[in-house]
Amino acid sequence: MATPRAAWAAAEVTIREATDADAAGVIALIDSCFSDYDGCVMDLPGLDADLPAVASRFREQGGRFWVAENAGRIVGCVGYVPLDRDTVELKRLYVARTARRQGLASRLLALVRDAARTHGARHIDLWSDTRFVEAHAFYLAHGFSQTGATRKLDDPSDTTEYAFRGPVEAR
């Protein structure tokens, strides 16, 4: 019998620009990712208020948002917004537990790098919850460095985040 990961790896994944109709799938994906961490919960009326209209919110800020689908289910997502002429911010890079370590996060990051290059940016900044140790390892392996900055969010998850900066060009 195939494991969920093996079944996923054998199936086709489509990455496309998100629409607001993808909101429920994006919310379900992020909620599932958060469930891996004690005390990490969605904050739809607060920090996650952009999610019910995620594609529109990113476009309004001059950015883009993509989803990865497998058999009609959203298994990954990522977006970016420009911060200034030289920098874009990577936001909401999430991959379903069953789809991890298959190269999907790298494909999603490549979309942001391509968009940042088109924007003329030299840097990609991001913030990541201190609990997301696997994500930190991914970013470090893809040329990002922790800047040393942290920020505390006023949210139900009592989140503290680390800042990362990486190059637009992959190393």
Image: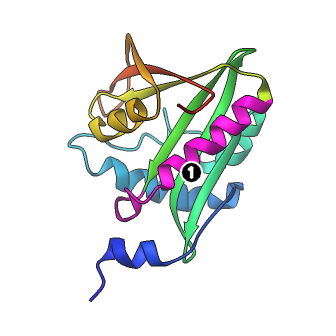
At horizontal 38% and vertical 39% (from top left) the residue drawn is 138
170 vs 112, nearest the viewer: 170
The quarter of the picture where the N terminus appears is bottom left
Asked if residue 115 lies in the magenta stretch, the reply is yes
Q: Is residue 70 above or below residue 17?
A: below
Quarter-wise, where is residue 101 in the image? bottom left
At horizontal 36% and vertical 51% (from top left) the residue drawn is 33
Residue, disc 1: 107
113 vs 131, nearest the viewer: 113
Is residue 129 shown left or right of residue 92? left
The amino acid marked with disc number 1 is Arg
Image label count: 1
Asked if residue 112 lies in the magenta stretch, the reply is yes
At horizontal 53% and vertical 31% (from top left) the residue drawn is 171
x and y percent of residue 40 in the render? 29, 40
Q: Secondary structure at mark 1?
A: helix
What segment carries the magenta color? 96-118
At horizontal 72% and vertical 56% (from top left) the residue drawn is 19
x and y percent of residue 97 in the render? 34, 59
Is any atom of residue 96 visible in this view? yes
Quarter-wise, where is residue 79 in the image? top right
156 vs 11, nearest the viewer: 11
x and y percent of residue 153 in the render? 39, 21
30 vs 90, nearest the viewer: 90
Quarter-wise, where is residue 18 in the image? bottom right
x and y percent of residue 41 in the render? 33, 43
Residue with the most extreme front position: 171
Is residue 7 shown left or right of residue 75? left
Is residue 71 shown left or right of residue 127? right
